[in-house]
Amino acid sequence: MANIVPEKGINFKVYLEGGEMLGLAEGTIPALEAMTSEVKGAGISGAIESIVLGHFNSTTFSLTWRAVTDLFMTLSEHRTHEIELYSSIQMYDAGLGIYTTRQLYVFLKADTKTFTPGNLVVGDNMETQTEFEVRYMKVELDGRERIEMDKLNMIYKVDGVDYTAQVRQDLGGQ
């Protein structure tokens, strides 16, 4: 029996519009925070923060870059950008004593909320920053789609299960 230990991210790259690498960066994959509302009343012993099925609060993510590049400057444009994050995750098989990798792929359609060209420091990173509002996100692990969130088309899928399909149908959609 295998004893697989997910150890760490080995490395990652950031691409813009399926093309060139944007630059050297650090960042955090966007968190999906469900919209909630309080449910309380007769027959319930207290209050519950109940999720709104398939709906999310503002979804943001940010990237911190080492230095300004020509391509990086296009992120200041007021439009939706397609950003791809490719990562390699290190796994250790304790039963066999070998290392393997898994690919994590994140595709985002996002608008730049904050564009900070950075600091001017002698001999150090510029720490340029961008913060984005996410409209669409797809997460794949080893080529298998695990999560798809599309706010404008009211789609939220996890492992192929569309939690908003019935909602769209209830609203007269497909």
Image (cartoon, grey):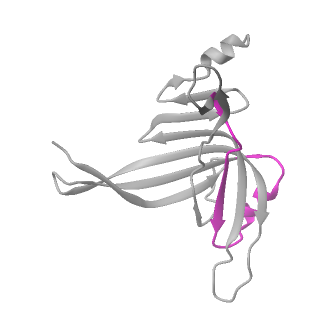
Vertical relation: 138 (above or below) 87 = above
Percent position of residue 90, x then y: 35, 56
Residue 103 lies left or right of residue 58; in this view the side is: left
Percent position of residue 171, x then y: 73, 13
The residue sitting at 63% across, 20% down in the picture is 42
Q: Could you say which is closer to the camera, residue 105 or residue 8?
A: 8
Q: Quadrant of the N terminus?
A: top left
Quarter of the rendering containing residue 27: bottom right
Q: Could you say which is closer to the camera, residue 137 or residue 72?
A: 137
The residue sitting at 76% across, 57% down in the picture is 75
Quarter of the rendering containing residue 62: bottom right
Asked if residue 102 is among those painted magenta in the image, a careful observer would answer: no
Asked if residue 64 is among those painted magenta in the image, a careful observer would answer: yes
The residue sitting at 59% across, 56% down in the picture is 14
Residue 63 lies left or right of residue 76; in this view the side is: left
The residue positioned farthest toward the right in the image shown: 78
Q: Which residues are magenta?
A: 52-81
The residue sitting at 18% across, 57% down in the picture is 97
